[in-house]
Amino acid sequence: MNTKEPEKIQRLLNELQKSDFHNFPQKRKILNVSSKQGVYIIYNFNKEVLHIGRTYRGSQGLKQRLKNHLYRSSSFMQNYSEVTPEILRSTCKFKCIEVENFRERAYLESLAVGSLCPKYIGSNDKKSKHKIKNK
């Protein structure tokens, strides 16, 4: 491991946390986000962390990964949450940053999960889902 690598990942986490909030688009509207690879955080209406994720390899990067959540084609939406696409669209927000390097994306996602610890982490129980209420 490069001795500067942990510092770089911490800087990336700070950048991610300081980045702007984005709204999920309404139905039939375009998701206006980068198609590059990166890491993202989904927040509920109280700005509590619901999910932290990263892109793996798809050509549409962040755009595709966030769309997967909107269409319930992600394990987070299927297994660990009562969040529906309608709730994502109406009350949730996300932050994201582009991270080209695969290793740095993996490391950043892990650091973010460990630092921000979404509620579903460690539950090991698909029945202990988030109780998400609208505003």
Image (tube, rainbow, N blue to C red):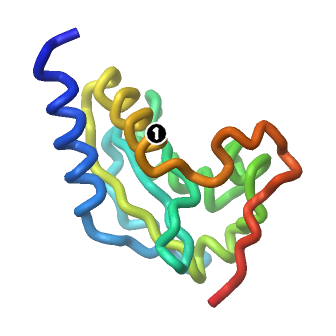
Quadrant of the rendered structure where residue 89 is? bottom right
In the image, residue 121 lies at what x, y percent?
A: 64, 43
Please, what secondary structure does the residue beneath circle 1 have? helix
Taking the view exactly as shown, the residue that stands out farthest to the left is: 4
Q: How many marks?
A: 1
Tag 1: amino acid: Gly
Whether residue 62 is visible = no
Q: Is residue 15 above or below residue 113?
A: below
In the image, residue 51 lies at what x, y percent?
A: 55, 53
Label 1 crowd (10 A; few <14 / some 14-19 / many >=20): few
Q: Which residue appears at 55% of the width and 56% of the height?
A: 67
Q: Is residue 111 above or below residue 117?
A: above
For disc 1, the marked residue is: 114
Image quadrant where one finds the C terminus: bottom right
Taking the view exactly as shown, the residue that stands out farthest to the top is: 1
Q: Which residue appears at 58% of the width and 59% of the height?
A: 50
Q: State the residue in front, 4 or 106.
A: 4
Left or right of 42, for residue 13: left
Q: Which residue appears at 22% of the width and 39% of the height?
A: 10
Q: State the residue in front, 29 or 40.
A: 40
Image quadrant where one finds the N terminus: top left
